[in-house]
């Protein structure tokens, strides 16, 4: 494990895709290895410095949530424990120091190109649209809502996945046209169910799950699977309950120190190349990721035992 952080995993496997955070490798025809680096992005720009332990947090917290979810939803995760991964694919043992505890061995799927966003509070781009038009993804919301207002019931707010830049919020009717009504409603119902579960678990730990996004794919047998990261500080907006107040923005338990520092700059226009992050900002951000992990799981990262998922299909 590198205390300095890992920007690029560089394994001796075919690299299928490199996202802002994850390097996705082909293990065989049915299996992928998803390695979460310590890269961090802000305003859709990947920054030069890694955030130590970030990739490990994202991987282990996803595994923890999927274990907590139990049989509520099928998912693509086969193994996250390094011993289990090596037992399944012994050839991966030689590069274990690079991927251990930051990698997920997963079933290969055909991803559905819709971000399944669920919003329990009015924040971020949703608040911006509502303030300007009174809508969310073009659909009318009740009048009189304020920034950070609770949305009851939570709203399924899908987005079309973008290859570059921001995903585009779209009405649910457009998802029905893209995927068919049956699959669209399955995605909506599953997403809201998982969000509600996560919201209740987080609330018991004095954390507000304001919103989150899920991704789904179809495996070779035609099953709909939950894929990628789940309820992480990169895919979700977590707020400390003790500081919540309607009518303003909330302190966020994620990479907020980076956004705050970048917002204060007068000489960066939020396009590449980005500035170097000061050491204190990197350290503060790493501490945020470790802190949300500890609050949610009840364990610090160094003592966390990755769950085992066994041979059963989920």
Image (tube, rainbow, N blue to C red):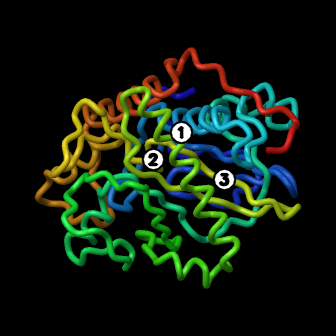
Q: Is residue 167 left or right of residue 182?
A: left
Badge 2 element = loop
Which tag, 3 or 2, sits closer to the chain's start? 3
Q: Residue at x 66, y 53 (%)?
A: 227
- The reply, left or right, for residue 199 in relation to residue 278 is right
Label 3: state its secondary structure. strand
In the image, taking residue 303 as reference, residue 71 lies left or right, namely right
Tell which of 234 and 75 is nearer to you. Answer: 75
Which quarter shows the N terminus? top right
Q: Are marks 2 and 1 in contact (CB under 8 Å)?
A: yes
Q: Is residue 146 left or right of residue 305?
A: left
Q: Residue furthest top?
A: 303
Badge nearest the viewer, 3 or 1: 3
Q: Quadrant of the C terminus?
A: top right
Q: Which residue is mark 3?
A: 227
* Residue in front for this viewpoint, 102 or 203: 203
Above-or-below relation of 151 to 10: below
Location of residue 84 with respect to 211 vertically, above or below: above
User: Residue 191 shows which numbered tag?
Assistant: none
Q: Is residue 188 above or below residue 277?
A: below
- In the picture of the structure, the residue carrying the numbered disc 2 is 234
Q: Which circle's residue, 2 or 1, is located before the other in the chain?
A: 1
- Residue at the spot 52% in from the left edge and 50% down from the top edge: 21
Q: CA distance from mark 3 to mark 2?
A: 15 Å
- SS assignment at label 1: helix
Q: Position of residue 303 (x, y in %)?
A: 57, 14
For residue 58, the mark is 1
In the displayed orientation, state which residue is furthest to the bottom.
177
């Amino acid at each position: 494990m590198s205390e300095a952080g890992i920007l690029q995993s560089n394994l001796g496997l075919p690299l299928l895709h490199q996202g802002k955070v994850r390097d996705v490798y082909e293990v065989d025809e049915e299996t992928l290895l998803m390695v979460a680096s310590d890269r961090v992005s802000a305003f859709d720009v990947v920054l030069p410095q890694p955030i130590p332990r970030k990739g490990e947090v994202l991987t282990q917290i996803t595994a923890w949530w999927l274990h907590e979810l139990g049989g509520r939803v099928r998912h693509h995760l086969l193994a996250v424990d390094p011993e289990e991964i090596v037992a399944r694919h012994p050839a991966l043992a030689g590069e274990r120091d690079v991927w251990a505890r930051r990698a997920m061995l997963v079933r290969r799927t055909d991803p559905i190109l819709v971000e399944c966003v669920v919003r329990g509070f009015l924040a971020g781009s949703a608040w911006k649209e509502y303030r300007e038009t009174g809508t969310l993804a073009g659909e009318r919301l009740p009048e009189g809502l304020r920034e950070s207002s609770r949305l009851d019931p939570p709203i399924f707010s899908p987005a079309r996945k973008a290859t570059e830049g921001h995903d585009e919020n779209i009405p649910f009717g457009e998802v029905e046209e893209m995927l068919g009504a049956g699959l669209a409603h399955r995605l909506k119902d599953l997403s809201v169910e998982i969000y509600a579960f996560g919201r209740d678990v987080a609330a018991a730990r004095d954390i507000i799950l304001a919103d989150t996004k899920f991704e789904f794919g179809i495996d070779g047998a035609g099953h709909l699977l939950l894929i990628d990261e789940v309820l992480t500080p990169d895919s979700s907006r977590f707020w400390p309950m003790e500081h919540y107040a309607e009518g303003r923005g909330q302190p966020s338990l994620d990479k907020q120190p980076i956004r705050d520092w970048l917002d204060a700059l007068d000489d960066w226009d939020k396009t590449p190349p980005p500035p170097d992050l000061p050491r204190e900002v990197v350290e503060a951000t790493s501490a945020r990721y470790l802190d949300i992990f500890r609050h949610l799981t009840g364990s610090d990262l160094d003592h966390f035992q990755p769950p085992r998922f066994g041979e059963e299909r989920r």
